[in-house]
Image: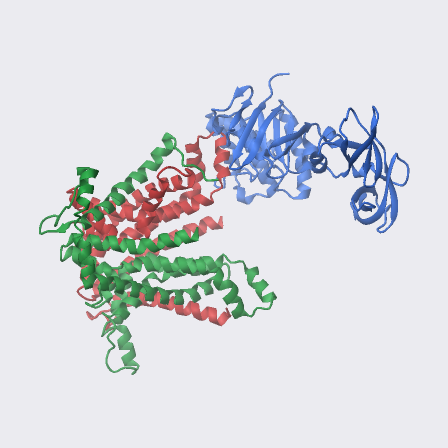
Chain colours: A blue, B green, C red
Amino acid sequence: MNDPVLRFDRVSKQFGATRAVDDVSLEVRAGEFFALLGPSGCGKTTLMRMAAGFETPDTGAVFIDGADMRATPPHRRPVNMMFQSYALFPHLTVADNIAFGLKRMGVDRATIVTRVAEMVRIAQLQGMERRKPAQLSGGQRQRVALARALARGPKLLLLDEPLGALDRKLREETQFELMQIQKKLNVAFLVVTHDQDEALAMADRIAIMRAGRIEQLGAPGEIYARPRTKFVAGFVGETNFFEGRVIARDAHAIRIETPDGVIEIAHEGFSGDHAIVSVRPERIAPGGAGRNSVAGEVQDVIFRGDHSLARVRLSSGALLRVAADAGALAQGARATFAFGANDGVIVDG
Amino acid sequence: MVERARRLGAGRRAILAAPYLWLVAFFLVPLALVFKISLSRSAIAQPPYVPTFDFGEGLSAILDKARTFGLDAYRGLFADPLYFEAYLTSLALAGLATAIAVAIAYPIALAIARSDKRLRPVLIGLAVAPFWTSFLIRVYAWIMILKDEGLFNRALMALGIIDAPLPILATNAAVTIGMVYSYLPFVVLPIYAALEAQDESLREAAADLGAAPLATFLTVTLPLSATGVVAGALLMFIPAVGEFVIPDLLGGSDTMMIGRVMWNDFFENRDWPAASAGAIVLIALLVGPIVWIERRRT
Amino acid sequence: MTMFARRAALLAGFLFLYAPIALLVVYSFNASRLVTVWGGFSTRWYGALLANEQMLASAATSLKVAALSAALSTVLALMAAVALERFGRFGGRTLFVGALFAPIVMPEIVLGLSLLLVFVALDLPRGFWTVVAAHTTFSLGFATVAIRARLATLDRSLEEAAQDLGATPLAAFAHVAVPQLLPAIAGAYAMAFILSLDDLVIASFTSGPGSTTLPMRIYSQVRLGVSPEINAASTLLLAFGSLALGALAFVSWRRGEK
């Protein structure tokens, strides 16, 4: 297809002694919903602020629509940003907030009025036009911030923790709204978030960042099912790790000696002699059937509505997380748990 | 990491230049001139001094003359018991007044900080409001109250407590009262700010851990408000040392505070070098401790 | 602090702060020439005051000096506050900060004296403009403190949002920061105005014939002893100050309500 809307080319940024962003290359394609996911301090916000122009990379370059942005100040960049705090102008009404960017473009009054009305409709803010930000609820403020950022018709919208300030219930509704608006307007979204559920739910592609570097980039399903590193496996979803020496191998599987017994895992060209395996709780079943089985005592059970999560103390002392039907496991019970060779993924340390 | 000083862009330089140039012209150059004149000799002329050196002569010439500097004004300062006593009196009276003001301001600040949340801004506003009214007028009010046939003495005599008026006006006591009164808002404000910022749960925790109200005050509230007390005391003490209006209007002819001595030297004796030297010593006296406190803090 | 102790402290404190001012006002309506002997209610001293042309001329001078020096001071203070809050560690910052804030703690007499020496050395005739310049220098530090405190609390992301929406940095400051700074700017102006109106010492050094300010005029009369006319003048000044202060408090209260 054509050029990506946003391209980071080997950008790095140092703050004092910390490398906030460390040699990152990344592309956001036209019309896609892209999430930068990582714990706080991983450099995701710095990376996004480089796209907006509020940070300058020490080395490397940022391209928007194929154009080098190194010498372009924020106000001349064809992207817009939705701030984490929303940054609504407290002294301006909702309509004036939305019109702010249009006025800077120097378009005529009539166009501004129609465009503002259109954004008000898209963000479902009818009747709120004359209110000041202080008179709005959290959800309404979020929508004003979105409408304001979209009003100039950017090809790429940057969203810094867009749902961070909303309560749990509102967050899910808003997720759907954001996705609908994104598809309808066909704008590329770059979202920064520390919430894996949010990223998994909304994004077409996710980049997982850690300590200034991209640890893995891919579609949500791929990242969840085939995490490349221990960090990614642990950060995205819940998981269990088995670790040990490789004692036997053939073309399709390896056998690993762990403190809880020998397990067998499928692999594709793994050549090391020490392996870490990630097994998701829902891939482990209580009872017998399965190539690998471990035994332990159920230490506690957390009720999660549709299922329960049990923590099982294994003979080695390690804790195993197992997802099971509610009520299937009782605290204090001894049981065996099994998983197949294809239920585990070998990850890097 | 220490950020390096950086060069500013043209726009920023223009914004900085306006206030910077103003301060150079109307503060730094004048201060340098005071220093220069303090090294000059007094003369009967207009302006009434003979410069020891000229900044225009260049550095080498100035350094040459440095060996024969006219330190007359400074020698005079130390030889003249008047100046020495004036410095002592200023420090002593300002110190005494500051101590009294802190003692009065603390309960007021505490009472405001412990008042209903909605009342606090009103009360602190009322406590600080006198600062916005004329200083001169507030000092004048005390002349009216303290003089021999003033309101205070007449009230005491009417009540039969005294037979003859107490001479208060034109004494150091009047100067102290005047300073406490005039600077009290300056002291209340920072103490209040420090007390108001304290988390109420700290006191609740102290009580929960068995501290009686007085123990809580002494071990939690008071230590945490120390910065406010120091700030308030400095805010009052420093200008009070150099005060002119209060000793001039409320003090006696023998209340020689340094501000008044300098004023007299300048306007009446026309000894500009002496007044300038007095100013330089005063700055050293006041700025020295501030720099020292700042250094110790960091 | 018990409720009783709290009320006692407030009562005693406010009595100490306000009783002298109240007495001053009450005795300005005294018919007697002896200030401290009550001789019945009268407004005669206000009449005498309004007929005192010297006093009126000085009041006019003071108001003009205050209005002008406060305006200059506020503009310079806004620039200084922006430089201190936004420009990082520029070269010469330490000297700048020192020169800016030193007049706050320095005895006024030192500032007055040093400025007089410069005006004499430059052979500048002392008068209205020298007082304006002196008062601007005097109040600049105070005004900067007032504006800078608010500027520091401003949410920087608001200006970033404005820039993101196409405003130049200067336009972002003007459209977004300045409206939020307005109360602080008004406060800085009011403070500079009051400081100028109130100053005796610096004006005494820097004014010339024909530019005698109100505090200088009052001072020279007070030195001769108390007089009911001074009480009347003081009362008018207090009323003027209270009105200004009340208006300022009302405006900030209204803004807080919204």
Residue lying at 57% horizontally and 35% vertically, measured from the top left: A45
Comparing C1 with A346, the one in front is A346
The image shows a total of numbered marks equal to 0
Left or right? Give the position of A328 relative to B94. right
Comparing A112 with A235, the one in front is A235
Residue A99 in the image: above or below residue B182: above
- Report which quarter residue C239 is drawn in: bottom left
Comparing A87 with B193, the one in front is B193
Residue B111 in percent (x, y) is at 46, 65
- Report which quarter residue C49 is drawn in: bottom left
Most extreme residue toward the left is: B44
Residue lying at 90% horizontally and 36% vertically, measured from the top left: A289
Residue A264 in the image: above or below residue B195: above
Left or right? Give the position of C151 relative to C206. right
Most extreme residue toward the top is: A1
Residue B223 in percent (x, y) is at 48, 62
- Report which quarter residue C172 is drawn in: top left
Residue A103 in percent (x, y) is at 47, 29
Residue C52 in percent (x, y) is at 17, 57
Residue lying at 83% horizontally and 48% vertically, measured from the top left: A298
Comparing A97 with A188, the one in front is A188
